[in-house]
Image (spheres, rainbow, N blue to C red):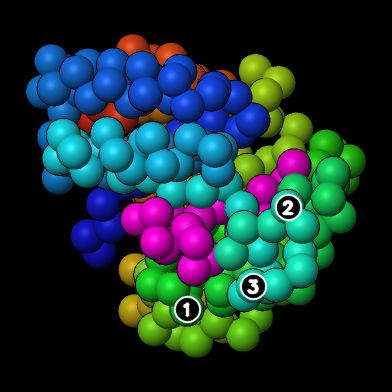
Amino acid sequence: MSERTPLMAGNWKMNLNHVEANGLVQKLAWTLKDHRWDPAKSEVVVLPPFTDLRTVQTLIEGDRLEIGYGAQDVSVHDSGAYTGEVSAEMLAKLGCRYVVVGHSERRQYHAETDDVVAAKAVKVLERDMIPIICVGEGLDVRKAGDQVAYTLEQVAGSIAGIGDDALATCVIAYEPVWAIGTGEVATPEDAQEVCGAIRRFLAEERHIELADKVRIQYGGSVKSGNVAEIMAQPDVDGCLVGGASLQADEFAAIARFYDLPSIG
Ligand SMILES: O=C(CO)COP(=O)(O)O
């Protein structure tokens, strides 16, 4: 068994202005402290919109909080005439540790392909940050029972061009699209089926030591009520949390999944 520290990351999506962001991070920090959260048992990260990053950086660095932060997307370009884009260098300068690439909402609404996702992941790695590479099938694929093959193809395309040493530092987030924001959570067995298949694929395509190091998250309607069972799966090394990460109490409870009873 490897020592993969579970990564509990809150993807705020397009929510909270910088004032609200300040309030949420402060409340999250107090709540984690109050409840004796153990950073050795789970790494906690927030992923605010770009406009909140400076505020979150100031608070986390100023108060020396043990909460990490990062961004939800990045440009494939380094600099220049790309209106509205934000580069990996800019994010690194703001102290970001993580950057989400290929979230299903980017793939769906911005037509991001696996090639684009792979190029973004490379940019993130070049600046010594960690990409959280998102993959996952839609409802039609799930109904046809093709979730494993579909997701592995996305993984293959989204890690193309990433060398073994760099890939070992990456996070892969399995987020079945039908479970995102719907309240319909995948069963722990569903999550394990695909997360386990991703790890076996990495072992076969690259090597077993690498596969053992990569952290694989599950995302999709994660809450304090279901996180313990999901985290009990051997190949699930953390969660990418949307809606529930906007409430400090709820996200703090998720971060302390190891103390929650696993029911069911
Ligand atoms: O997309 C997600 C995280 O990136 C999941 O969102 P929800 O937790 O709101 O379902």
- Label 1 neighbourhood size at 10 Å, few (<14), some (14-19), many (20+)? some
What residue appears at the point 81 percent right and 64 percent down from the top-left corner? 113
Horizontal and vertical percent position of residue 86: 62, 58
- Please provide the residue range marked out in magenta: 88-105
Q: Amino acid at mark 3?
A: Ser
Q: In the figure, residue 264 lies in which quadrant? A: top left
Which residue matches tag 2? 84
What residue appears at the point 75 percent right and 42 percent down from the top-left corner? 105
Q: Do labels 3 and 2 touch, CB within 8 Å?
A: no
The N terminus: image quadrant: bottom left
Which residue matches tag 3? 79
What residue appears at the point 63 percent right and 43 percent down from the top-left corner? 175
Horizontal and vertical percent position of residue 176: 68, 41
What residue appears at the point 54 percent right and 38 percent down from the top-left corner? 51
The reply to whether the residue tagged 2 has its Cβ within 8 angstroms of ligand 1 is: no
The answer to whether residue 38 is left or right of residue 170 is left
- Tell which circle, 3 or 2, labels the residue nearer the N-terminal end: 3
Q: Secondary structure at mark 3?
A: loop
Q: Secondary structure at mark 1?
A: helix
Q: Amino acid at mark 2?
A: Gly
Query: On screen, 217 above or below 62?
Result: below
Horizontal and vertical percent position of residue 198: 56, 63
- Tell which circle, 2 or 1, labels the residue nearer the N-terminal end: 2
Q: Which mark is residue 23?
A: none
The Cα–Cα distance between marks 3 and 2, rounded to whole angstroms, is 11 Å
**Residue 181 visible to an observer of this rendering:** yes
**Residue 193 visible to an observer of this rendering:** no
The answer to whether residue 176 is left or right of residue 146 is left
The Cα–Cα distance between marks 2 and 1, rounded to whole angstroms, is 21 Å
